[in-house]
Image (tube, rainbow, N blue to C red):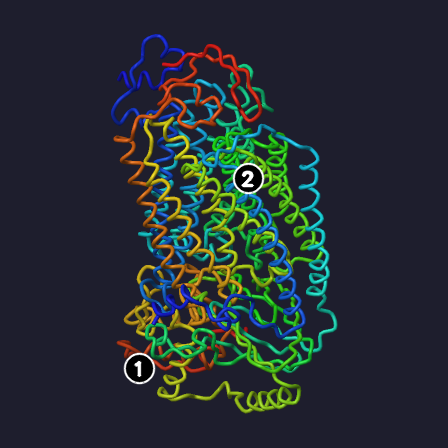
Amino acid sequence: MTAIDSALQPAHDTAHGHHAKPGGITRWLFATNHKDIGSLYLWFAFSMFIFGGVLALCIRAELFRPGLQFWQPELFNQFTTLHGLIMVFGAIMPAFTGLANWMLPLMIGAPDMAFARMNNWSFWLLPPAALLLLISFAVPGGAAAAGWTLYAPLSTQMGMGMDLTIFAIHIMGVSSIMGSINIIVTILNLRAPGMTMMKMPMFAWASLITAYLIIAVMPVLAGVVTMVLTDRHFGTHFFNAAGGGDPVLYQHIFWFFGHPEVYIMALPAFGIVSHIIPTFSRKPLFGYTSMVYATSSIAILSFMVWAHHMFTTGMPATAQLFFMYATMLIAVPTGVKVFNWIGTMWQGSMSFETPMLFAIGFICLFTVGGLSGVTLSIAAIDIQLQDTYYVVAHFHYVLVAGALFSLFAAVYYWFPKMTGRMYSEFWGKFHFWWSLLWFNVTFFPMHFLGLAGMPRRIPDYNMQFTDFNTLASVGAFCFGLGQLIFFANMLHSLRHGRPAAAKPWEGADTLEWQIATPAPYHSFVEAPDLEVGENGRINAMHGGKHH
Amino acid sequence: MASRRVLLLLTGWSPAVLAANVNLPPPVTGIAQDIYDLHMLLLYITGGIFVLVFGVMFWAILRHRKSAGHQAKHFHENTTVEIIWTLIPLLILVAMAWPATRLILQQKSSAGAELTIKVTGYQWKWHYDYLDDGIAFMSHLATPQSAIHQVADRGEHYLLEVDQPLVVPTGTKVRLLLTANDVIHAWWVPQLGVKQDAIPGFVRDVWFKVDRPGTYRGQCAELCGKDHGFMPIVVEAKAQADYARWLAARKQAAAANLEDPNKVWPLAELMARGEKVYTQNCVACHQANGKGIPGAFPALDGSVMATKDKPGHIDIVLNGSKKNAAMAAWGKQLSDTDIAAVITYERNAWGNHTGDVVQPKDIKAARGGKA
């Protein structure tokens, strides 16, 4: 009872007596503390990462050599579909929301997230959605097998696994919209005095802009999958030409969601890296203001480029040209970001702890993905590369070396603040070099496969593609193995890590490093008075209470 | 074998292997050549940018490190530098957009075609219809099922071979009109530089002009269901004279093969033909042993439909299933004779010894004169 009570009390009440942390399962089930919910998100995301990773390895096992070895093509398609959906909606997005939950209040001096109870619900919607996806493998006809994009009319052909997927998407959509509302309201209303918008940490800016993107496009996704649902069961013909519909309409709506979604998974990464690079360069972020504007322009441009995913659908030349030019434009603000990071490192005093290694790895490999993105943006070339392994290589450079590496960087960076203990630096660095090597062994050859003519989403291939597929499969299994090192390091350090100082990183200057380590369960129950510099640098802090 | 190859890959790549496998395949049309060249240009530009930018970064990593005793400077903005590194990428992009725009306009100008062929994507095969010459045929995967499971049966063109390729004349502007029967497919032959989605209910066009005779292979590029990986495309480009000969022979054969719709076929002949039709069209889902795939595709062996309900059987083959969209309406694709044969086959193969014979005229009757 006391657990429920104190969990549901607003933060200011806990100041009058309920000091103890709630215990047992209720601490998590009825969690309203942003740190607890953040941890729940991160654990959930990691378990989904493992689930999606196992699916990826099932795919790579089949593709190790030509011929059908392990799975029937139908099951193979289910693996590719669920791998994509789970990694996007189950792993990357919840991981960023989890980090935002954990760190935002600490970075801007707020007592908690604005809507603590809704926060509980945002998280607890996710496990049932994941469960729906999981059990869809066991229903007649199996899981959805139309690719994570669920293109109609293929998706109208599927069995009830598709319906489960549609409902799962609905639920995850509601969850991320609620999470986003929380992030926006928290950032706009709960900043401590002195923490003005144009001084706020880049991670807060990135989370804020990402949250707006999510609110703008998740309803679009929910709408389009609902249209598939009614086409499937209620006799509508949105995507059936015989009934006056248009299959390409699906793609327009889907990618109007889908392209901003790419930046939903990339912008928070930009935010994280914009803290780690300055910290370990012992130098302020170069071009903070231009970073804010670059992030905003990327977000706005992301709404104008959706049809570059559809260059082979047979659009008129003018449409192709418009979407090509708009897409190429995104390279400019993205370039500004990369230059700013390098400008931050320039003339710094760098050291290379694990978070910094992952951040530098992020910049290099994300740029590879960005440059192959520029190549793909050229509609004339995209005709050859669309739906090939070149595209698979491109978006894994952006999402694995981009989003995932930044997440690793963030977890290593904030681990001391979250847990009060240091992770093993040796195993952290080992994890980085191991991941870097095998990531490239896995995904770099895919550029060649795509150029040479291997389509994506096929379970079997001509012998000319054997060598690079074998190489990619070996790489994938090694990469997967390496993540167990990460897991073991985290698990061990959680209990046995060396106690961390309040500010374990010499160059860290944002608010979360001004308070005790581990962060008190109720931090900033009384807002501090802050003197803040750009990118959330704390020049002076007065007052502020924690419990 | 595979491990030896990997070793080879890791230790030393022969230039021949490099050329063959790491770039776009050798182009055989003007457009494909232009795409190839534009891609090379992009590769040089983006590669150059990468080396330059990360050269600077790694120089900083080497020199401006704490362990080397470097002290951090505290500058954090420089308007001039920021304007320069916004403008230069913009100019590079304009330089890229210029040739790209010209190529796109060229790709899109299908006017003045000398030969028009309608291409229809089916799950999982292609149908080619020479609109001006009155010949049409289905193009199926020719790789036998056994090769998918046994290395020994695999030829050089494993999964990239068909029973009837699309034949086109060289030096001729060929325009394809693409559509699909069920879901979205994409017709892609890399060496021609052509990829175009085939969308059910809509017609899209695309064009190519092959310079030299040869056989060019590609695959469906848009996920279209279970056997997406098993619907290759083969284009055979013949010199004009050879093409004319092929066309004449094709027309003659078509005329000779015109079947008498009222012919009464004996069971054995129907079974033989039905097995062929079954292997080409039905085996992907219902399997060679007629057992289907439980949960996804129903069994025919011993099913009520294939042993008792003859009108229902004819109806579902002709008009498709109302419950399961994966079962196509074959009446649109196959002749009366083929449908009669395959139904007869299904009612007599495996354990189904019904002795039922379905004749082409039964199918004609079932179509209700609609066909």
| Residue count near mark 2 (Cα–Cα under 10 Å), binned few <14, some 14–19, many ≥20 | many
Residue type at the position of mark 1 = Gly
Query: Looking at this rendering, what residue extends furthest in the top direction?
Result: A16
Q: Residue A25, image x and y in percent?
A: 26, 27
- Please tell me in which quadrant of the rendered image residue B131 appears: bottom right
User: Vertical placement of B25 versus A170: above or below?
Assistant: below
Q: Label 1 is found on which chain of the structure?
A: B
> Can marks 1 and 2 be said to lie on one chain?
no
Q: Label 2 is found on which chain of the structure?
A: A
Q: Which mark is residue B355?
A: 1
Nearer-the-camera pick, A104 or B220: A104
Q: Residue at x 38, y 11 (%)?
A: A13
Residue A245: tell me if it is visible.
Answer: no
Residue type at the position of mark 2 = Val
Secondary element type, mark 2 = helix
Nearer-the-camera pick, A126 or B293: A126
Q: Residue A217, image x and y in percent?
A: 55, 39
Q: Which mark is residue A217?
A: 2
Distance, label 1 to label 2, CA atoms, is 59 Å
